[in-house]
Amino acid sequence: MAKLVMDCRELKAIMDSYISDELLVETNHDVLRHLESCPDCRREMSDRRALKSQILHAMKNAAETQLDPIFAARAAAELREMALRPRFRDVLHPRILAVGLACLLIVALGGLILLDRLTQTRQTPDLSSNNSNFAGLAEAIRVSWSEMTSQAVGDHKNCAVAFHLLEKPVSLDQAAISYGAFNKDLDKTVTTTMQDLFKGDTPDSVQVVDAHSCLFEGRRFAHIVLKIKGRIVSVLVTDTDLPAGNDDIQTAHFAGALNAAGFHLGHHAVFVVSELPDAENITIARSLAPVIRLHTEQVGA
């Protein structure tokens, strides 16, 4: 019997648990499959994650949660005093300590031999079911990443090049309040990094065209538009609920000589889209990865 696909009502009931990583692996698979084809739920997931980030950031920086400096100094002094006190092992006679360690070693070796014998008698578990689940999850991640990449390229075409967006973009300052703290000053981080990367070229090799937050096909991007070596370059950052990857740069090629290079940082995906050669696109992405990671960590996004 075919498994029923999770609907929007079911997803919304467990959405907060998903964001907090409290669900079973199989349920996470169902959530990912639903998000692949439902822009409304992707948008609500992004909004809820941004709200959670704002609440955590506010709690972290609230005056009532700050550590009292007097208490901190007293605690540090007490810890230093405890560290300087003679410990039980320091007052043991060396011969007594040696005998005790020898006894412990004998007991440990005996336990390891018994454990090895018990392990050898156990049957090897059937991993075929788990392998199938992992394969399904990997495919769901691949499809979702491919869709996100296509949306980033579509945003580049319709926002940075043709200005055909259905909804008017908002400033990054406003987006930082409404859609996630990572938007705040993201343009400054990106621009400074690009100016350092291309500082050996002509003074006008990097120009800032625009910086805003825009919506394309139900996905919201922080969008920094640059002109590098005379070519329009989009740096796009969006929320994602995909499992964390290994920060490798993933590339894709599209019609019209467009190249995309993307990477995954925590709960954010970052894309560089342009008509620059693929090698330069990858170089830009690699330069941005550490600074955007530091930026999101500092703002608590």
Image: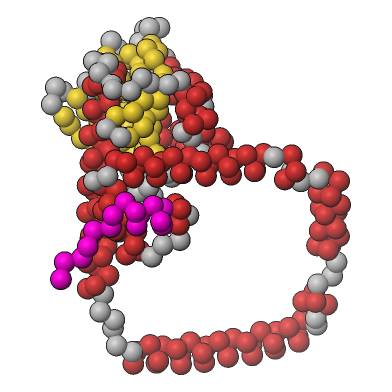
Residue 283 seen in this snapshot: no
Q: Relative to 112, is 145 above or below?
A: above
Q: Residue furthest left?
A: 255
Q: Relative to 129, is 59 above or below?
A: above
- Image quarter of residue 288: top left
The percent position of residue 46, horizontal first and vertical second, equals 41, 41
> How many numbered dots are placed on residues in this image?
0
The percent position of residue 57, horizontal first and vertical second, equals 59, 40
The percent position of residue 60, horizontal first and vertical second, equals 65, 43
- Which segment is the magenta one? 1-15
Q: Residue furthest front?
A: 9
The percent position of residue 87, horizontal first and vertical second, equals 81, 72
Is 10 part of what is drawn in magenta?
A: yes
Q: Relative to 69, is 203 above or below?
A: above
Q: Nearer the viewer, residue 29 or 258?
A: 29
User: Which residue is at a point 35% across and 49% down the rendered structure image?
Assistant: 242
Q: Quadrant of the N terminus?
A: bottom left
- Image quarter of residue 93: bottom right
Residue 75 seen in this snapshot: yes
Relative placement, left or right, of 257 versus 156 is left
User: Which residue is at a point 62% across and 87% down the rendered structure image?
Assistant: 104
User: Which residue is at a point 77% across and 81% down the rendered structure image?
Assistant: 94
Q: Relative to 8, is 81 above or below?
A: below
